[in-house]
Image: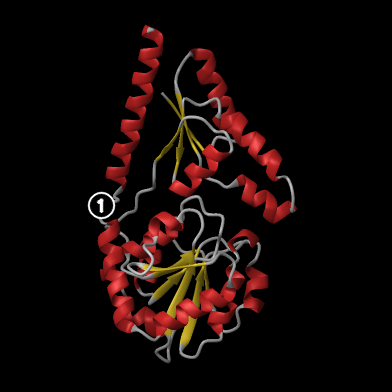
Amino acid sequence: MVHLASPFVLGVRGMAAAARLGIPSVAVYQTDLAGYARTYMGAGEAAAWRRIRSVHGAADRTLAPSSAAQSDLEEHGIPRVRLWPRGVDTARFRPQHRSEALRRELAPNGELIVGYVGRLAPEKHVELLSGVCGLAGVRVVVVGDGPSQAHLTEALPGAVFLGRRTGDELARIFASLDLFVHTGPFETFCQTVQEAMASGVPVVAPAAGGPLDLVDHGRTGLLVPPRDAAAVQEAVRALAADPARRAAYGATARATVEGRTWAAVGDQLIAHYDDVLADRKTVVAA
């Protein structure tokens, strides 16, 4: 079996080699290339889908990380698509890592801490947090780096920029948030939403792409229209005013992801391998 992760560069060669050797291949779809084409070039979406069809059409199975991504692929003619979500490290990301010392450092006046974690790039639309920065008693904390950082320091007045953080330090930041907000509309999965949930933090995210599978609206967080700054601000305002609701969402979020360990997701992947190998044997026997 050849496993191809995001197979658009080196993976294409791997797929060609697998075909020559008669070895089945499984390709993982991770990046919304068409969405990136719209964001960075304002065009090229059709060309992106031609590339996606060319690459994934040659695989014995394509694994999509969310139901939205699976539907998108199938609607654009990609065959043999199955769902394979992502796991989360529920031991590292957990509510017990909440740090009052860190909270005092980030919000010395006891503000509600609203966090974003991820790449700072145009397709993430982090500037949608600008209205949240204007809410009384709220401190926005941004974790990550990228080409939009300079612009965002101006667009998000009063926000704390922590740069890129990883490992246990990142887990401590997640658990110390009161609310996590994701703003990007092009996520095929959105791992940071799942890490926030594992940390017992309620989530506000766009009703698009991967977050549709992750956020149970009204139970673990709130889904808002994509690229709607007013909706983001209003969702944060509503949750900021309701500590009991935030606590309930956070507890339900943690309970929701406790079974999504990488071990469990790894077992799902092995099951996909077994299915592909069985299909190959059936074809050969026929």
Q: Give the side of residue 74 with respect to residue 196, left or right.
A: right
Quarter containing the C terminus:
top left
In the image, farthest residue toward the top: 286
Q: Give the side of residue 228 with respect to residue 267, left or right.
A: right
State the residue position of label 1. 259
Q: Is residue 58 or residue 15 the one in the foreground?
A: 58
Q: Is residue 170 or residue 22 the one in the foreground?
A: 22
Q: Give the side of residue 155 with respect to residue 158, left or right.
A: right
Q: Classify mark 1: helix, strand or loop.
A: loop
Q: Is residue 132 visible?
A: yes
Q: Give the side of residue 35 with respect to residue 209, left or right.
A: right
What is the quadrant of residue 122 in the picture? bottom right
Tag 1: Cα neighbours inside 10 Å, few (<14), some, or many (≥20)?
A: some
Which residue corresponds to the image point at 34% horizontal and 53% vertical from the top-left? Answer: 88
In the image, farthest residue toward the front: 75
Residue 144 % position (x, y): 53, 64
**In the rendered structure, which amino acid carries the disc numbered 1?**
Gly
Residue 245 % position (x, y): 32, 78
Q: Is residue 54 or residue 7 the one in the foreground?
A: 54
Which residue corresponds to the image point at 40% horizontal and 54% vertical from the top-left? Answer: 213
